[in-house]
Image (tube, rainbow, N blue to C red):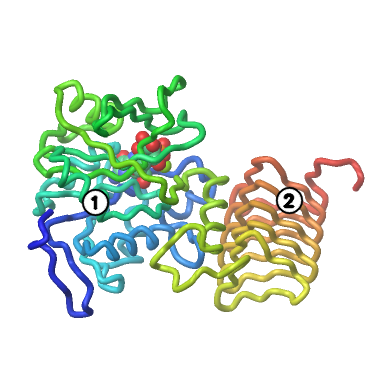
Amino acid sequence: MNSRDTSVDKEGNSVTSSVQALILVGGKGTRLRPLTLSAPKPMLPTAGTPFLTHLLSRIREAGITDVVLGTSYQAHVFSDHYGDGSDLGLNLTYVTESEPLGTGGGIRNVYDELTADTVLVFNGDVLGGTDIRDVLSTHERSGAEVTLHLVRVGDPRAFGCVPTDADGRVTAFLEKTQDPPTNQINAGTYVFDRKVIGEIPAGRPVSVEREVFPSLLAQGRHIQAHVDDAYWRDMGTPEDFVRGSADLVRGIAPSPALAKPCGESLSLDGADVASDAVLIGGTVVGRGARVGSGARLDGAVIFDGASVEAGAVVERSIVGFGATVGAHALVRDTVIGDGAQVGARCELLRGARVWPGVQIPESGIRFSTDV
Ligand code: GDD
Ligand code: MG
């Protein structure tokens, strides 16, 4: 990227025309089932907006307007919601894989749409606070063909582990290894010189993590690391989704899509919350959702139209669209599918998942014997 490629648009925002962005959003989101049966993972609501809007807003904030969505699973949901992207100040296009091509195949599949020499690729399920321009600067400064954004985590085993040398050059890429040599992991943002994308095999599934990066390294090609300590979370599991949503509400995770952090809770338009209900821990109550008298919600994500009845307790859990949690029920570390009805005095704990539309009668599931 050169500074001469940066101009200013009608609203006075800077625009970088030499960089295009691609967001991979074709995954099935299996770890977030059953919520991802009705919507793709990046379209699940967080702090009042589909999760992907936070990432799109960050891309726009970095001055990049040309964005391609690499879709597969439930592709129409993205285009129905975002259209041409103009509401967000973006020029959005869609490239759909009829069969999922994997992360590398998904990148190769948009090659014909790419006109810029530099392509920023994002995993579509990451909530991050990294300065995207800094990642681009690292790429430009080092002269690498590919640059990977890395973060440090406590347990790298669920991620791509990426050791580097003293100059910040990537020395290996070890996807989901049980024996990680470092706690530096792939944060899911890459800068590619466009010509490298053209080298990825076309027309078959390819993993960028297991095939493309290891093969480039085996050829001695230059992959640079950009390591930082900015906010970062992969939203792919219920625990992370609940944490990420709460972090957005509390302003711990930055997002240009939110006018301001909301504090301990956020009640969206048309939510009906009893005055003596307790909403803490970054709880979100969706549009038209109801929370009854004396209910206690701590780190809860209540989707639109759902209902939590009097005296119920919901902790670190997601309650799907139009679902009901009955009076005095206890719901902790649980995912409740769209339209499900959890009867009064039920107890759902420790990773329970209720499938959409399921009806559990009063006291139908408990973890204690004092009914
Ligand atoms: N277009 C398309 N096609 N997109 C896909 C496909 C596909 O076949 N498969 C997955 N994706 C998208 C997902 O929608 C998601 O946005 C992204 O690619 C990454 O897929 P995940 O399934 O979320 O991968 P992960 O979380 O297990 O691991 C990846 O992300 C980690 C960081 O969050 C890897 O890139 C790891 O190396 C990395 O550490
Ligand atoms: Mg992921």
Instruction: For residue 333, say whether it is visible.
Output: yes
Mark 1–mark 2 distance (CA, rounded to whole Å): 42 Å
- Nearest the camera: 43 or 97? 43
First in sequence: mark 1 or mark 2? 1
Disc 1 versus disc 2: nearer the observer: 1
Left or right of 186 in this view: 197:
left
Q: Could you tell me residue 281's position as x and y percent?
A: 64, 59
Residue drawn at 62 percent across, 57 percent down: 319
Q: Residues within 10 Å of mark 1 (few under 14, many from 20)?
A: many
Amino acid type at circle 1 is Leu
**Ligand 2 location (quadrant):** top left
Q: Which mark is residue 13?
A: none
Residue drawn at 63 percent across, 44 percent down: 353
Label 2 SS:
strand
Q: From the Cβ of disc 1, is ligand 1 less than 8 Å away? A: no
The reply to whether dot 1 and dot 2 touch (C-beta < 8 Å) is no
Q: Is residue 299 above or below residue 13?
A: above
Numbered disc total: 2
Q: Is residue 334 above or below residue 275?
A: above
Left or right of 130 in this view: 36:
right
Residue drawn at 48 percent across, 49 percent down: 37
- Nearest the camera: 163 or 287? 163
> Quadrant of residue 307 in the image?
bottom right
Q: Could you tell me residue 52's position as x and y percent?
A: 38, 58
The residue singled out by tag 1 in the image is 22
Q: Is residue 50 above or below residue 164?
A: below
Amino acid type at circle 2 is Ile
> Quadrant of residue 292 in the image?
bottom right
Instruction: For residue 305, say whether it is visible.
Output: no
The residue singled out by tag 2 in the image is 360
Q: Could you tell me residue 223's position as x and y percent?
A: 21, 33
Residue drawn at 64 percent across, 56 percent down: 299
